[in-house]
Amino acid sequence: MKVSSTVPKDAKGRTFLFRQLASSYFTMILTEWERWHITQWSNPATTWSLFSEKFEQGDLEDGILEPVVEIVLAAQEKRYVDANDGYLRLSIGKAAWPIGVTMVGIHERSAREKLHESDKGAAHIMSDEGTRKWLQSIKRCLSFAQTRWPPDDMMQLMG
């Protein structure tokens, strides 16, 4: 069952979406994972417990749910590079990262104050241990999915 590209706003639609993500997509991937006996990644049962807890509670805010839907939709269409890009945007964001020395000489860089502007008021998504494990599980599922269901276009394999 392919997920919709938009997140429903009503409770019934969101419940159906959570069931679609948990029961259809991630259950299929983790069942295949178990059948393939891949031991290099964490135990599929542990990964499933992380997913089922989040989806059964239905407590994902739109800021997390929308990128997850984007990731799953891209993976279902075997666009793994796009799915990986969605994962990276969700996990590390699009904020500018200061690289190297920021204070050189006697003048401050003109855009230096904008580097941390988007970080104000909200904690980073990876700072919560449970969310971090959950997001890493999504990445593991993507990695397995691309080996189990390779894309027709080899340019869509993520590195």
Image: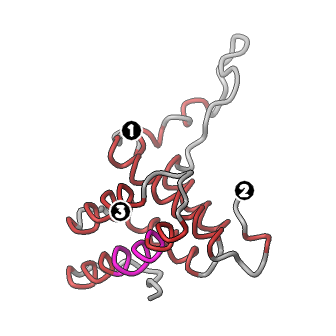
Q: Tag 1, which secondary structure?
A: helix
User: Is 139 within the magenta?
Assistant: no
Q: Which mark is residue 66?
A: none
Q: Residue at x 41, y 46 (%)?
A: 132
Q: Tag 2, which secondary structure?
A: loop
Near-viewer residue (97 or 74)? 74
Near-viewer residue (90 or 55)? 55
Disc 2 residue type (three-letter)? Gly
Q: Mark 2 highlights which residue?
A: 159
| Labels 1 and 3: the sequence-earlier one | 3
| Labels 2 and 1: the sequence-earlier one | 1
Quadrant holding the C terminus: bottom right
Coordinates of residue 3 in the picture (x, y in percent): 44, 83
Coordinates of residue 53 in the picture (x, y in percent): 25, 61
- In front of the other: label 3 or label 2? 3
* Quarter of the image where one finds residue 28: bottom left
Q: Mark 3 highlights which residue?
A: 48
- In front of the other: label 1 or label 3? 3
- Measure the C-alpha gap from mark 1 to mark 3: 21 Å
- Measure the C-alpha gap from mark 3 to mark 2: 24 Å
Disc 1 residue type (three-letter)? Ser
The vertical placement of 61 against 106, above or below, is below
* Quarter of the image where one finds residue 154: bottom right
Residue interval drawn in magenta: 20-30
* Quarter of the image where one finds residue 120: top left
Q: Residue at x 78, y 78 (%)?
A: 153
Q: Are marks 1 and 3 in contact (CB under 8 Å)?
A: no
Q: Mark 1 highlights which residue?
A: 127
